Amino acid sequence: MSRLKISLSIRNTVLLAIVLGVLVPALSLLALDQRIARRTHEPLVQHNRDAVMLLGADVLAEPLWTVNEAALRQGIDTLLRENNVCGAEVAELNPGPRPLAVKQRRCADTVRMAQRETPILQDGKPIGRLRVWFDDGEIERLLTDRRSTVLWLVLAQVLFGTAVLLGVLSLRLLRPIALLKGQASAIAARTPSPPLAWRRRDELGQLGQHLNEVRSRIDGLFEELERKNAQLRKMAMYDHLTGLPNRTLFRELFQHEAAVAKRGKRSMAMLFIDLDRFKNVNDALGHAVGDELLLGTSQRLLQALRQSDLVCRHSGDEFLVLLREADPWDLVASTADRLLRVIETPLPIGRNAAAAAQGRALPDIVLDRAGAQEAQVSASIGVALYPRDGEDFDTLVRHADMAMYKSKQLGRARYSFFHAELNEAMVARVELERELSQAVAHNELVLHYQPVVDAPSGRLHGCEALVRWRHPQRGLLMPDAFIGVAEDSGLIRELGAWTLDAACAQLARWKAAGRHPGRVAVNVSALQFRDQRLLETVQRALREHGIAPGELELELTESTLMSDTAATQRTVAALRELGVALAVDDFGTGYSSLAYLKRLHPEKVKIDRSFVRDLGSDSDDMAVVQAIIRLGQALDFQVVAEGVETGLQHDLLLASGCRLLQGYRFARPLPAADFEAWVDEAQGAAA
């Protein structure tokens, strides 16, 4: 069973202590006084009674001896004048025929009395007796009178002491405590008020000064905490680089604006902006310069838009813009076009970028006359309209994102509006990505081989392995149908590893059958080439299938070889140590750099089919082809012409000095078995 707990405030506790401290001693003093008074008065009363008895016996001795009744009565009256005498009686000891006896009483019978008796002597001989009745309540009356007097004195003392203590308590304790309580409450509630001035030097004054110091420190801590909270909120709601709202805050702002637009029955526009080839700047000049470019772009967007429009940094090099007014739609189009022009304007960047850019092939980075760096990027914009294309934030952003990707597919540096077909295409793309992720496990990929022919002799020089996808529903798919999806989703690494392993396995089977086709070329994407696992993948394929040095060739685009040259050179050197040859594919269509071409020195350069297609009718294409052929002869690397389809193209290339040809003129990419049959037929014809 729990004990009863009584909680008292300091005020009530002190008051209770005062009451107990004053009343208890006063009551104790009163009781003690009664005991002492009783002890003091009882002997006095007895002594007084003894004196009355002695005096009475002496006064009444003569009248009793002379038998003077009148004198006896007068003596008894004298005794009765004493306050404590209630009655007296005198009687002879040796009475005669008429005994003398006198008795008088003045108290009622209800009065409690004490009887005393003493002999009356005459010349030392008893002649009578004196009996006196005393008031036995005399002591009690005396004590009562004294108690009343003492009680008034104690009461006066208690009242005076209590008044003094309460005054001291109020001035020196209760009021300071009330001030301290108010001060503490103000600290707890953070009520703005000036600090209290404590002039007292006692403990409460020191405590008040400490509370002032504590409040000052707490206020400082709260101010710092509020600053930190503001910073955290800004970090949580704003992009740390550009200061623009981030996706979280932008979502809240959109929801508010959407509610307003819905009530007003007006349209809004969501613009999804993605900077084109921004990765080139980041990779070449570093993230510091990239951040500078993003910051400058965000500031330009703010300047180009109305104050009522909202801008958000979505992620990386992507921005979102919410136009509150989208009526008519051509207003949105003109705004998107204005943003494209603003973004494309060259943006000055730090001079320290010059060192980072030294020796790099970057068409987006130019020098002005003063030698300062300027970065120029374009943007692709997708536009989705509210509420036509979506009424919630995620749907509208997703549709604007689809429209932005459509802009990139159409060549970048443009804007596109969302329409329902884009959503269907995106759904199909997602489904294709899902199916592609299962294609390797389900053994749906297959390699076709296209021969590379030595033109003067017509003999097989080698072949290129090209991947195909035997889709369960759509049939045989060419690379154009799924390579883009593989690159965007990251599946290109897995796909490239499978292609490399399958090509080496097929080469090993041909070698075992005595049908060596020459060097087998395999395409490697930029993502796969930058993958640190590429060397391990190549080494494992060579070791498991027994591929000798010089039998495997990797084809890379020139943009892949020209990016991040230090890492590229290390990878190229490691591949050459493994005996793997390198070929530059689609030469002339990317960012060509003769310095890098000389430094990396590939074994083979393949002229892109776009230069071969119009050789018979376009003198410029002929000049480019001849220049590449002469460059190969000067730098001692082989030149292969791709896309050879006609006899005229064959003859012109051969006449220009290009010995290695590849294209439909000789054979389409063929399955392994058909390729073997073609080789047998071609070798027989050449013989």
Image: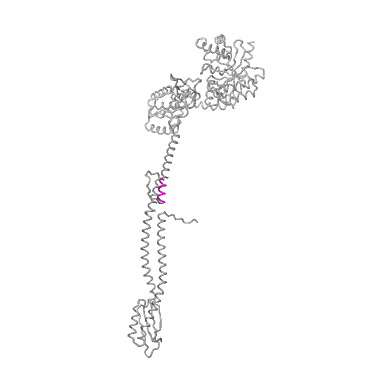
103 lies left or right of 460: left
Report whether 511 appears left or right of 494. right
| Magenta stretch contains residue 67 | no
Please tell me in which quadrant of the rendered image residue 324 appears.
top left
Q: Residue at x 36, y 58 (%)?
A: 164
What x and y, as percent, mark residue 280?
49, 23
Foreground of the two, 396 or 17: 17
Left or right: 613, with 102 as reference point: right
Q: Specify start and end residues of the magenta stretch as a single range.
A: 203-212
Q: Position of residue 19 (x, y in %)?
A: 40, 60
Name the residue nearer the viewer: 532 or 46.
46
From the image, which quarter does the C terminus lie in? top right
How far across and how far down the image is residue 493, in percent? 56, 25
- Whether residue 204 is in magenta: the answer is yes
165 shown above or below 458: below
Residue for point 64% across, 17% down: 516
Quarter of the view holding residue 526: top right
Residue 6: quadrant of the picture = bottom left
Spot occupied by residue 662 in the image (x, y as percentages of width and height): 57, 14
Residue occupying image coordinates x 48% and y 56% = 3
